[in-house]
Image (cartoon, rainbow, N blue to C red):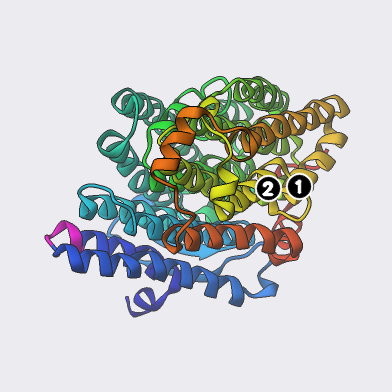
Amino acid sequence: MSELLVNPLFLASAVPFAVAVAILCGLPKRWSVRLAYLGFGVPAMLALWCWANFPAEAGAGYAFTVRGSTGLEGFGISLALGLNGISLPLFVMAGLVGLAAGLYAIRSTAERLKLYLMLLLFMQAGLMGVFASMDVFFLYFFHELALIPTFLMVGIWGGRDRNYAAMKMTVYLTAGAMLSLLGLIAIYVKSGSNTFDLPTLRAALAAQPLAATTQKYAFALLLAGLGILVSLWPLHTWAPLGYGAAPSSAAMLHAGVLKKFGLYTLIQVAIPLLPEAARAHGQVIAWLALGNVLVVGLVTVAQRDLKQLVGYSSVMHMGYAFLGLACFTAAGTGGVVMLMVAHGYSAALLFLLTTSIHQRTQTLDLAEMGGLAQRTPVLAAFFVAATLAGIGLPGFANFWGELGIFVALWKFSPWFCAAAVAGVVISAIYGLRAVARVFFGPTTPALNNAMAANPPADLGWGERLPALILLVMLLLIGFWPKSISDTLNAALTAAPARVAATR
């Protein structure tokens, strides 16, 4: 127990959970806000410490490992925490996006702020646990801990169509979670190893793989369930609606971090444990992913609501990640992880800035905006940078993820690669159009009169600091990709089974 209480991975999840419980038990509002800084700040600091001290020799193994008793060891369930080269950058991303979302929430004017912060802290605790878990049961458990507050936050603090959005999210994401659970249980039962411990399962199934039929059905369940959670086309319609209605900090955490659970579980669990079935589904994954890139991309171009545009854009970029997975190569999988990390920062930044724009213009209709750059130059600079990052401009983290995926995809199929590159053009069209309409286009008479009577202020530090955290990480990884690629490459090359096989 003493080892557990000083382990950075345990504390990164336990601290926000403890603060959330304290608020739930009736902590006064003043202390709730003060402790919320601790609840969001400690996981971020611990994640950065793990990043700085991750041992280079870890390879495909785990570092900072710790195990705690649960009383369920007879069922093969134990609290096992650890980071490898794949989970490390996502763990850091969860900590920093959580810090940015938390800082933005604390300085917000949300009603029932105590309840708002409590639910965000429960989300943060779950997110840190997801990427630190070496036990498949707790991997799923922490995801559910982070998911349930999302429904409540959309329903209580959401915007337009919040009740319908919350209901649709609940139906879709519950269905996805249940299908995923069935797939995980199938692996547990059929493996015969009586454990949910991921390293043990990998060793057992590497020595004695599951039958082809078992792999086929288990992987199909996981692909369907996790695909819904990641908003894989055509089961993606919950995501733009949900993000459009969600309060800003909830959208930042869900779109930026929680949605990566599906891809992460495919990479860490499904593909290594079910390699034959994964290869057999490669073409299916690739075709569905093109739906995200091309179909959803064109739908994004047609959007006239800024927040809906950002929501559809987030769904579109998940298509690139699935295309990288479909290649089943170390380069493709590495590109996917890089893109997951980059998308986490850029999507969170765009949702934050979209809310800042709405607060200053009182509209999300692109046709009603214009000329905001003259009045809010800092906001304009951040939004332009976030848009260029989303497009994949060199110098930002997104570039390296997309580049790795395109290189792997060319070897998989030049035709798929060409179609995916066309998606970059689509991203540039809707991204740059949004920048032009909001900041550099002519101001409508109604908006001009409104801003003349009540001039909009530029970003204050309550908005600027969380935005700066996210932008700095996009630039840091963009100019120094080795900061995460070295440990990622070590994990992928030391464990070829993790990507099933190289084509």
How far from the left and from the top, in percent, is residue 94? 49, 56
**Residue 137 falls within the magenta-colored stretch:** no
Residue ID for mark 1: 393
Q: Which residue is drawn at the image coordinates 54% and 25% (left, top)?
A: 367
SS class, disc 2: helix
How far from the left and from the top, in percent, is residue 386? 62, 48
How far from the left and from the top, in percent, is residue 224? 52, 26
How far from the left and from the top, in percent, is residue 461? 45, 63
| Residue 148 versus residue 416 in the image, above or below | below
Q: What's the CA distance linking mark 2 and mark 1?
A: 6 Å
| Residue 242 versus residue 439 in the image, above or below | above
Q: Which residue is drawn at the image coordinates 38% and 70% (left, top)?
A: 11
Find residue 502 and name its label: none
Question: Magenta part of the protein: which range?
Answer: 22-26
Residue ID for mark 2: 389
Judged left or right of residue 172, residue 327 is right
Dividing the picture into quadrants, the one containing residue 155 is top left
Q: Amino acid at mark 1?
A: Leu
Judged left or right of residue 268, residue 15 is left
